[in-house]
Image (cartoon, rainbow, N blue to C red):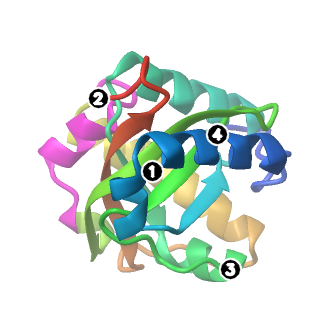
Amino acid sequence: MPDSAASSRALPLDTAAAERMWEEYRAAHPEAVAGAPEHTIEHFGDSARLADELLDIVLSGRKRATAELVADFVARGDGLPRVGSHWIACDSTGAPRIVIRSTELRIGPFTSADAAFAADEGEDDGTLESWQREHRVYWNRVSAARGAVWSESDEIVFERFAVVWPPEHAD
């Protein structure tokens, strides 16, 4: 996850296009939306390079999990996701690419990540060791960007997800 040109979530988001994508998904899957009508529009990572790199791993099918500091949700004024909630993942240009649905969530410290979660995140070589190394760098950077110091005891949202839209990318 390291990126020397971090922009701390300053990437543009094409919310109008994302809302059109959401409406297409909602029309095709009204039952899924009825149970979890909320959605967010975001991108992976904290830079254009990282947004595209991680999205590409999702599109390849290798990445089906992600982790984010609870403090980052709070700093943005966002609520924590819940099982069944949706988010629209955008690329570095802000274009919406896919709708993701949370399938499993838990909150825990850094040390609670295990090899299975690291493999499901699909980043780097997929090992727990690389997950730990890369996330230490990333969370130190994003915490510093918001004026905080990261600690391994900070709460992390560990999320597994499915890609549900568009049909050509759905699991």
- Seen at 66% across and 54% down, the residue is 41
Residue depicted at x 76% and y 45%:
6
Which of the labelled discs sits on residue 21, or is there none?
4
For the question of whether residue 38 can be seen, the reply is: yes
Nearer the camera: disc 1 or disc 4: 4
Disc 2/disc 1 C-alpha distance (Å): 26 Å
Q: Which residue was labeled with disc 3?
A: 75
Q: Position of residue 46 (x, y in %)?
A: 69, 48
Viewer-side label of 1, 3: 3
Asked whether the residues under the numbered discs 1 and 4 touch, taking CB atoms below 8 Å apart as contact, a structural biologist would say: no
What is the number of the mark on residue 171? 2
Q: Please report contact status of discs 4 and 2: CB closer than 8 Å, yes or no.
A: no
Question: Of marks 3 and 4, which one's residue comes earlier in the chain?
Answer: 4
Q: Residues within 10 Å of mark 3 (few under 14, many from 20)?
A: few
Q: For the residues carrying marks 3 and 4, which lies nearer the camera in this image? A: 4
Circle 4: residue type = Met
Q: Nearer the viewer, mark 2 or mark 1?
A: 2
Question: Which mark is first along the chain, 3 or 1?
Answer: 3
Q: What is the spatial separation of the Cα atoms under label 1 and label 4, in whole angstroms?
A: 31 Å
Which stretch appears magenta? 112-125
